[in-house]
Amino acid sequence: MARYTAAVCRLCRREGQKLYLKSERCYTPKCPVERRSYAPGEHGQSKKKISEYGVQLREKQKARRIYGVLETQFRRYFRLAAKKRGVTGETLLQLLERRLDNVVYRLGLGGSRPEARQLVRHGHFQVNGRKVNIPSFLVKEGDVIAVAPGSRDLVKIKGLVENAKSRAVPEWLELDAENMRARVARLPRRDEIDVPIQEHLIVELYSK
């Protein structure tokens, strides 16, 4: 499967804000966004007037980069959101939040979404008792996510679980750190999705 393999810090600099793609480094003075707050490349420091289309495009790119989704898959999420009842933009964000790699990250079992994605791919998690190694797997209300039995004694996993105990977990998720498991209590509301995205701009972009 295709994936982005270049320096992820360039993505944050291109969007002009932290997307928290490298866990600990994003919280230190070494973060490139703090050291060089302009876009990467030869013309990164030049000032340009951005068109309406450009603003909408940047918002879509930002959402893609935060959740680690490529263009084709992102369009698929949008089409799925457009078919459902409710506000399309909010439904789109809800679908992205329901991805298994994002849920693992929200539970604090991954320092960043890329790290959580790698852990899922390596088969360290189960959903409802069955191993799932697909990061894009969409969880639903009532699903139980647990660390796979064969991974519970790994030093890496134990360290992540200990860190998860001190992190705030969204109200739509219930974490039982002692038993290394969690439950999707309900689907997330828009006010519980703390991503710096103006989803209506994405809807406007795809509606043209």
Image (tube, helix red, strand yellow):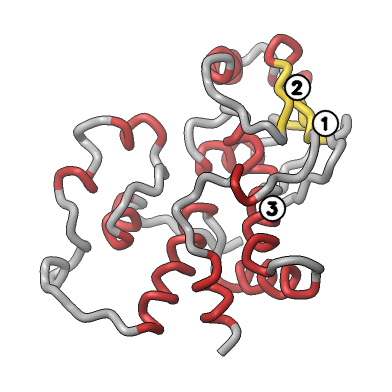
- The picture quadrant where one finds residue 54 is bottom left
Residue 111 in percent (x, y) is at 48, 31
Q: Judge by depth and name the residue closer to the eye, 148 or 199.
A: 199
Q: Which quarter of the figure is the C terminus placed in?
A: bottom right
Q: Which residue is mark 2?
A: 181
Query: Secondary structure under badge 3?
Result: loop
Residue 76 in percent (x, y) is at 69, 71
Q: Which quarter of the figure is the N terminus placed in?
A: bottom right
Give the left or right position of residue 132, taking residue 74 as reference.
right
First-in-chain label (3 vs 1)? 3
Residue in view at x 70 percent, y 67 percent: 87
Q: Which residue is mark 1?
A: 144
Residue in view at x 48 percent, y 53 percent: 66
Residue 85 in percent (x, y) is at 81, 68
The reply to whether dot 3 and dot 1 touch (C-beta < 8 Å) is no
Residue in view at x 31 percent, y 52 percent: 17
- The picture quadrant where one finds residue 96 is bottom right
Q: From the viewer's perspective, is residue 15 above or below residue 29?
A: below
* Amino acid carrying mark 2 in the image: Arg
> Distance between the Cα atoms at labels 3 and 1?
16 Å
Give the left or right position of residue 101, taking residue 111 as reference.
right
The reply to whether dot 2 and dot 1 touch (C-beta < 8 Å) is yes
